[in-house]
């Protein structure tokens, strides 16, 4: 079986709906018949909560942190949880110590890559949800995935955060001789304002070769999060699910994956 495509969902600016984008992108890929492994490396564990696995966040060892710090002492399968739409490597309260624990480790930014190599057989995609800040944890997500999905709000503060993110990614590429490709920018929670329209135009100009996906503000996303699944498992029809479906289709095409019939 071909190696899975890895996607890193990140933006160091908080409050952009990063986790909502990650969960619903994974749900869209699953809806196309793809087998997905979702990895929550954010110490806050929002995705773990949004997938209905809050008990995993408070679970006793072994945890994700144990697998990153002492990979030879932890069976990777021990930290994978079942979910109807995807398998999940859950975050854990222990991940709050990850930055300090990994900073002193050898090849610190390569630990997730090593862990995924033990886990990813049988999957078509790995979706990594990063914390809303830059540092060694996000380095792990970027280094392991190499394909970048950027959630951003359609507001002026997004300009600086995106510029800083690309500067940071460029430095990581140079330091480790890797290429990290932006695969999608998700303009999230769009409202009908002039400021939003101006930012959408800026996204198009700043990232001419990157597909831009427009997600309008919908309370249905929060309902799905509260219920522990993506919008693709919701009882109601949600128009914005079509945007995530389109993104999943384009990623399949870009990364040479075929839709699997149910």
Image (spheres, helix red, strand yellow):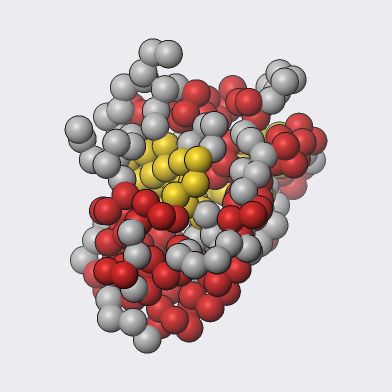
Relative vertical location of residue 18 with respect to residue 103 in this rendering, above or below: above
Where residue 86 appears, x then y in whole percent? 48, 36
Seen at 21% across and 66% down, the residue is 177
Seen at 63% across and 26% down, the residue is 233
Left or right side of 113 for 245: right
Relative vertical location of residue 237 with respect to residue 215 in this rendering, above or below: above
Q: Can residue 212 be seen in this view?
A: no
Seen at 42% across and 70% down, the residue is 66
Relative vertical location of residue 260 with respect to residue 110 in this rendering, above or below: above
Left or right side of 71 for 200: right
The N terminus is located in which quarter?
top left
Q: Which residue lies furthest to the bottom in this view?
A: 104
Q: In which quarter of the image is residue 22?
A: top right
Q: Can residue 53 be seen in this view?
A: yes
The C terminus is located in which quarter?
top left
Seen at 76% across and 32% down, the residue is 220
Q: Residue furthest front?
A: 60
Left or right side of 64 for 170: left
Where residue 109 appears, x then y in whole percent? 34, 71
Left or right side of 152 for 254: left
Q: Nearer the viewer, residue 238 or 52?
A: 52
Relative vertical location of residue 88 with respect to residue 247 in this rendering, above or below: below
Q: Quadrant of residue 216?
A: top right
Where residue 181 appears, x then y in whole percent? 34, 50
**Number of labelled discs?**
0
Q: Nearer the viewer, residue 209 or 225?
A: 225
Q: Which of 93 and 247 is in front in this view?
A: 93
Where residue 152 appears, x then y in whole percent? 61, 50
């Amino acid at each position: 079986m071909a190696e899975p495509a890895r996607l890193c969902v990140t933006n160091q600016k908080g409050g952009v709906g990063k986790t909502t984008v990650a969960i619903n992108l994974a749900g869209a890929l699953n809806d196309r018949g793809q087998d997905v492994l979702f990895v929550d490396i954010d110490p806050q564990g929002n995705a773990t909560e949004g997938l209905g696995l809050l008990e995993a966040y408070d679970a006793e060892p072994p945890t994700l942190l144990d697998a990153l710090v002492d990979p030879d002492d932890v069976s990777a399968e021990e930290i994978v949880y079942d979910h109807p739409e995807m398998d999940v490597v859950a975050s854990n309260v222990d991940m709050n110590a990850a930055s300090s624990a990994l900073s002193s480790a050898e090849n610190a930014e390569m630990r997730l890559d090593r862990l995924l190599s033990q886990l990813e057989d049988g999957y078509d995609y790995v979706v990594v949800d990063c914390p809303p800040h830059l540092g060694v944890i996000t380095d792990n997500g970027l280094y392991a995935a190499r394909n970048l999905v950027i959630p951003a709000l359609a507001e002026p503060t997004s300009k600086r955060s995106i510029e800083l993110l690309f500067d940071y990614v460029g430095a990581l590429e140079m330091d480790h001789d890797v290429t990290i490709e932006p695969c999608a920018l998700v303009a999230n929670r769009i409202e009908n304002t002039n400021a939003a329209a101006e930012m959408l135009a800026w996204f198009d100009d700043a990232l001419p070769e990157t597909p831009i996906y427009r997600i309008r503000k919908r309370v249905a996303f929060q309902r799905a999060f509260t219920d522990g699944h993506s919008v693709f498992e919701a009882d109601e029809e949600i128009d914005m699910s079509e945007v995530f479906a389109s993104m999943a289709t384009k990623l399949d095409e870009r990364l040479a994956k075929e839709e699997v019939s149910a």
